[in-house]
Amino acid sequence: MVKEKATDLQDIVSHCKKLGFIYQSSEIYGGLSAVYDYGPYGILLKNNIKEYWWKAMVQMNENIVGLDAAIFMDPKVWKASGHTDAFNDPLIDNKDSKKRYRADQLIEDYIQNKIQKKIDKDVAKGKKRFGDSFDKEQFLATDKRSLERQQKIDSILNRMNNALNAADLDDVKQLIVDLGIVCPHSGSKNWTDVRQFNLMFSTQGGGATSEDVLYLRPETAQGIFVNFLNVLNTSRQKIPFGIAQIGKAFRNEIVARQFVFRMREFEQMEMQFFVRPGDQMKFYEFWKEARMKWHLALGTAADKLKYHNHEALAHYADAALDIEFKFPFGFKELEGIHSRTDFDLKAHQELSGKKIQYFDPELKESYIPYVVETSIGCDRMFLALLSDAYHAEMVPDAKGGMDERIVLKIHPSVAPVKCAVLPLVRSNEELTNKASEIFDAIKYSFNCQYDEKGSIGKRYRRQDELGTPFCITIDGQSLEDNTVTIRERDSMKQERVSVELIEKIVSEGVDMRNLLKQL
Ligand code: ATP
């Protein structure tokens, strides 16, 4: 019997550090906040996620092509896109603790800790008292205290959103004062005024532009928009078609927390799909379904993924939703799907003075295409994948007792190491030679690892921690009849097979096509 323990974020952070998936940037100098480096296994897993995304987009769709635009762009790009003027978060400092916060997050945390928690507590009490017959929805719709609390939440959020939309920062501050919000560090109410903080990092031009300031791109999308004409004129694509790109983006997040969920330097995988005006909702629905399928194919439990429709739309969007994943800290945005209208291409046409239009041969007219985009953070996807895959299980040990094993049940097609080659004992040269021979024969086909150090049980555990789908063990019998045991990670079942079959079994088990065929 296998028994499981719940996972929290600290388990994932510790695991990533211990195994060499992720390290904090500049750790020997104390660590740079919200910037991370990917270690030997992290980079393998991250590359596999990118390969799966790229193949699902570019290889599988003849009407999607790839692009790799530069991080630096003409500063006018960010003027046209609205980032220079409006890519802001409301910032507030506490004068006593000198700690800095996002004003909207302070208010949301207040709602969660001071009001929502009380509602949740009453729900839990009701569940305890009435068991299975307790109807949560009905309770929330009829219980007087819960209704009053919900009304209070709605009225706070309403006031906050109105103030933010009207850029009325004085009222955002006043709301914090009226609610009596204290600094979580000092307990003090000694706040500065709220001010807008632009999230773009800037640097000097160095002759690359006539302007003094260059920005590190805060999203990859604009590289696609400004190359729309180039791609159109060189790729023989006709609308509808898409451009896909994977690349770094930079945001000076005010409060960066939750590990690689919110970083200052991160990687995005974005696809902009250009469509005829009026067709956008059809493609929005299409990509909404297609992207959910991509996630589900990885074996992620369906109840850990959900859509969240945006009520308040960004100025450029006529529809938007997030695919949310149930991280150890709750459901949060993993991917955004946005119908961006013709906002970006139109803005670049206006500011550059260059006509950015498409002549539709069927309609015999020119127009600025509409855009439906899918945008996912590679690092957030990495965290989602690990959170879903990490299992601490109690499993039977060799002595008839129970032992804990940590195992990453990652889909074999994206697992960092596909196969480990393990001679049963290190001291037997015949065994280690045979194992090396096997390793040398199969290493051309997939990423494998040779390991002869420690007991075989410990080596299996280490491969389980890495998420390696297959372990090949070479023992005394292997020398006699050219067979090995092959152990499958999740079931821990071992089977004896002929050496000739290893490559075929592993290749079939880890083939990326297993994922792509489900899309
Ligand atoms: P959030 O509301 O969480 O800040 P966002 O709505 O600003 O995210 P988008 O601008 O839609 O995010 O970016 C698209 C995707 O890029 C997000 O769904 C997320 O996966 C990823 N992403 C955005 N900001 C970060 C970040 N600071 N660190 C890591 N990934 C990020």
Image (tube, rainbow, N blue to C red):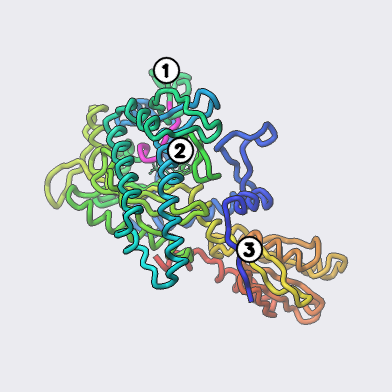
Q: CA distance from mark 2 to mark 3?
A: 34 Å
Mark 3 Cα shell of 10 Å, populated few (<14), some (14-19), many (≥20): some
Q: Is residue 138 above or below residue 377?
A: below
- Please say if the residues under marks 2 and 3 sit with CB atoms less than 8 Å apart: no
The residue positioned 23% from the left and 27% from the top of the image is: 353
Q: Is mark 2 within 8 Å of ligand 1?
A: yes
- Vertical placement of 174 versus 513: above or below? above
Residue 299 point in image, percent of width and height: 48, 66
- Which residue carries the number 3 mark? 392
Q: Amino acid at mark 3?
A: Ala
Rendered image: mark on residue 332? none
Give the mark, 1 or 2, whose residue is nearer the N terminus. 1
Residue 212's mark? Answer: 1
- C-alpha separation, residue under disc 3 versus residue under disc 1: 53 Å
Residue that numbered label 2 is attached to: 249
Mark toward the viewer: 2 or 3: 3
- In the image, residue 422 lies in the stretch drawn in magenta: no
Q: Is residue 271 above or below residue 290?
A: above
Quadrant hosting residue 157: top left
| Magenta part of the chain | 215-223
